[in-house]
Image (cartoon, rainbow, N blue to C red):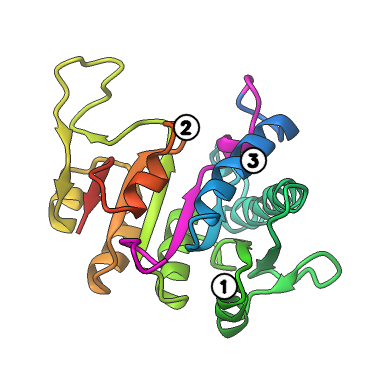
């Protein structure tokens, strides 16, 4: 563990990481694939906490377009993140990774309430902790929840795992001349409005000097390479 660049990380996943080809719902096969990737990282000896979104189950913008109140739409999304957390917990437990789900919205019959010191204790005991329920408050994204929880548990870095291998100046699928960034400052990431994370999350990380690493979850060995100190993805610091 002493050879790793980061000893404790928070891995932020999108809900789509658990969805099937349609991009909607929870695909158990996909959940198993994500769990396998996490286990490979876990086996290095790093302490891992996770925050997962809910875009595969619910997008608040759909409700807002139909006149739904923002707070209601956001609460529905937070509940959906707990469903994703339970699915990922099941997939991890089935391959031998002891996992705890905590949630900012109390659901005591299915998950622990989020308690910072208890989450840290689980990590110290070698358990993976999945933190659902967002921040527990509307008007905040799961990116902001990831940044907040990373600070609270004393993570060394916030890893934003996506479908692209880095941050680009434009969509590389549409613009082959898009510039790939290896490093960015927090201010540049905010000013360029790259949309890789929301401004609240980036600002929170900037104020607390929390490195953000954006990489491709599905690129074989990408997270392990990062933890070993190799240049992977884009780092915002």
| Residue 5 picture location, percent across and down | 30, 61
- Pointer 1 residue: 123
Task: Kindly state the secondary structure of the residue where label 2 is placed.
Answer: loop
Which quadrant is the C terminus positioned in? Answer: bottom left
Q: Earlier in the sequence, mark 1 or mark 3?
A: 3
| Residue 183 picture location, percent across and down | 16, 47
Kindly report which numbered mark, 2 or 3, lies closer to the viewer in this rendering: 2
| Residue 160 picture location, percent across and down | 40, 48
- Pointer 2 residue: 218
Name the one closer to the observer, 173 or 203: 173
Asked if marks 2 and 3 touch (Cβ < 8 Å), the reply is: no
Question: What residue sits 20% from the left and 52% below the top?
Answer: 190
- Badge 3 density bin: few <14, some 14–19, many ≥20, Cα 10 Å: many
- Residue 145 badge: none
Q: Which residues are magenta?
A: 1-22
Would you place residue 56 above or below residue 103 in this image? above
Distance from disc 1 to disc 3, alpha carbons, whole Å, reads 29 Å
Would you place residue 187 above or below residue 150 in this image? above
Would you place residue 83 above or below residue 108 in this image? above
How many marks are shown on the rendered structure? 3
Which quadrant is the N terminus positioned in? Answer: bottom left
| Residue 139 picture location, percent across and down | 49, 60
Question: What residue sits 17% from the left and 41% below the top?
Answer: 182
User: Is residue 2 on the magenta stretch?
Assistant: yes
- Pointer 3 residue: 58
Image position of 178 (left or right of 83): left
Question: What residue sits 57% from the left and 35% below the top?
Answer: 16
């Amino acid at each position: 563990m002493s050879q790793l660049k980061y000893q404790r990380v928070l891995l932020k996943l999108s809900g789509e990481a658990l969805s099937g080809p349609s991009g909607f719902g929870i695909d158990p096969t996909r959940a198993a694939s994500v769990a396998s990737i996490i286990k490979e990282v876990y086996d290095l000896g790093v302490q891992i906490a996770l925050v997962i979104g809910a875009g595969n189950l619910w997008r608040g913008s759909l409700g807002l377009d139909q006149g739904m109140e923002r707070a209601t739409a956001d609460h529905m999304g937070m509940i959906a993140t707990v469903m994703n957390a339970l699915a990922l917990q099941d997939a991890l437990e089935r391959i031998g990774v002891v996992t705890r789900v905590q949630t900012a919205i109390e659901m005591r019959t299915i998950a622990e309430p989020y308690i910072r010191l208890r989450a840290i204790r689980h990590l110290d005991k070698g358990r993976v902790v999945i933190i659902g329920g967002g921040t527990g408050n509307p008007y905040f994204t799961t990116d902001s929840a990831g940044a907040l929880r990373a600070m609270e548990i004393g993570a060394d870095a916030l890893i934003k795992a996506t479908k692209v291998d880095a941050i680009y100046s434009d969509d590389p699928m549409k613009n082959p001349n898009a510039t790939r960034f290896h490093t960015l400052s927090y201010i540049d990431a905010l000013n360029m409005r790259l949309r890789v994370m929301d401004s609240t999350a980036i600002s929170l990380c900037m104020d607390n000097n929390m490195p953000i690493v954006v990489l491709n979850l599905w690129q074989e060995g990408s997270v392990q390479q990062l933890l070993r100190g190799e240049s992977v993805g884009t780092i915002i610091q």
